[in-house]
Image (tube, coloured by chain):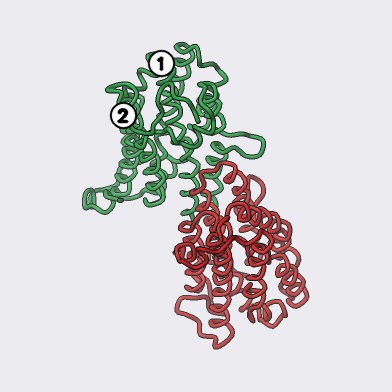
Chain colours: A red, B green
Amino acid sequence: MNDVIESHAFLNEAPLSKQDFEAAIRAVGAERYHDKHPFHKLLHGGKLNKDQVRAWALNRYCYQEAVPRKDAAFMSRAHDRELRREWIHRIHDHDGLGDEAGGIERWLVLTDGLGLPRDYVISRRGALPATKFAVEAYVRYVVEQPLVVAVASSLTELFAPAIHRERIAGMLENYDFVDDHVMAYFKRRLSQAPRDADFALEYIKQNALSRPEQEACIEAVRFKCDVLWAQLDALHHAYVTPGVIPPGAYQPGQSFP
Amino acid sequence: MNDVIESHAFLNEAPLSKQDFEAAIRAVGAERYHDKHPFHKLLHGGKLNKDQVRAWALNRYCYQEAVPRKDAAFMSRAHDRELRREWIHRIHDHDGLGDEAGGIERWLVLTDGLGLPRDYVISRRGALPATKFAVEAYVRYVVEQPLVVAVASSLTELFAPAIHRERIAGMLENYDFVDDHVMAYFKRRLSQAPRDADFALEYIKQNALSRPEQEACIEAVRFKCDVLWAQLDALHHAYVTPGVIPPGAYQPGQSFP
């Protein structure tokens, strides 16, 4: 792990200006964010059938479910109380707090709307192994990398509002089994993600001071894009082309014991 | 790690009744909780000077500071959202939430009252290495042990209210540099600890079903008592008898650069 900082690349180079550092982070999204994946084009364009949308939603549940564990793992490493006090609202956003049910509950409203039994979704039994490997790699990354790199890996949130807006519009227009109610998760994220991304961007600008640290942060955003992209590759392979579903994974039309 | 579950001890024995299981947990406190340590007798009996109380407070800060990281580490391993939603209030109790400052802030009010600079306390520079090793061993234990065993390791809270009441009364009576304001941490814990202990006790009763699992939970309480006891041994050795202070640790009368 931690390849970039430990390598000799950039060791003798001056730090990027804060402006160039931010531009380099944003360039990763332009090149690698999963809005460019063909599966998302199909999803948002109404080209998937209900079973394929189900497969997407129940696999993506694994990612949703990993995020608060990832954020708790981050907090478990942070000695700075103010940083923890800021970061904890990410867990509240996903798990809810008191009467607020949180993002995972809103995701389950989506899978409810698609006719998937909650127990089945929550069990992650029907998810693709590649999905689970990818999201747990993200949790481990946050456990193992320097804190500033762990913060940087959250910065795909910079690119999220655009895809969420495209998804809300496309799915509402194109699928008769999707309505405002089941899309509530994405609507809420339109306001949550920018707040988080602003904080994280400011944090890495203040704390990644050397060029190797900056490059490690840029690499973290590439890594995170890989985590997101790999999930769509697995979905596309299993449920679109060639459509070879791994043993144990969700089968269109299956019953739910 | 995880010696008891992996050993063959108790493998063929029937589970304890819930009542006997709870009694075995409570018996660990009666035998091993740090209310029995001679350092606490000195502390609560007014037998320490202000420098010795300072040493206690700045070392114990390391434990306070580790607890929310320990709780975040626990949450990072919990797939059960309801369990995370319950557990997170422990982090709120220590780190605060919004306008509520939290237990670590209350601890710093205590170290303020003792005339220790906050930066020095928070840096943990002057803490004994044995203190830091002990509290970080607790964080690692919660990362590495089965979840139910990790829950059990919190159960020294069953024994905390008695020592807190003794401490509040004893320190207020015996030290002119201690007042109600600086003892606020312990007063708050009188109501927080029992709630947490009740939940944890119920959780292990419901989730440690085999005898080896139950024994691992009992062992977890012993482990946690060791974590607390080791901190007092180190304090006693450095600041009471023989009074040999390790290099770098807080020195009575030192200046704070």
Nearest to the observer: residue B92 or residue A185: B92
Q: Circle 1 — which element?
A: loop
Residue B94 picture quarter = top right
Q: Nearer the viewer, mark 1 or mark 2?
A: 1
Residue that badge 1 annotates: B49
Q: Residue at x 54, y 27 (%)?
A: B188
Nearest to the observer: residue A155 or residue B88: A155
Q: Is residue B206 left or right of residue A127?
A: left
Residue A83 screen position, x and y as percent:
59, 46
Q: Circle 2 — which element?
A: helix
Label annotation for residue A123: none
Per the model, the C-alpha gap separating discs 1 and 2 is 18 Å
Q: Residue at x 52, y 55 (%)?
A: A69
Residue A193 screen position, x and y as percent:
68, 58
Q: Local crowd at mark 1 within 10 Å, few (<14), some, or many (≥20)? A: few
How many marks overall?
2
Mark 2 residue type: Asp
Mark 1 residue type: Asn
Residue A240 sits above or below residue A182 on the image = below
Residue that badge 2 annotates: B233
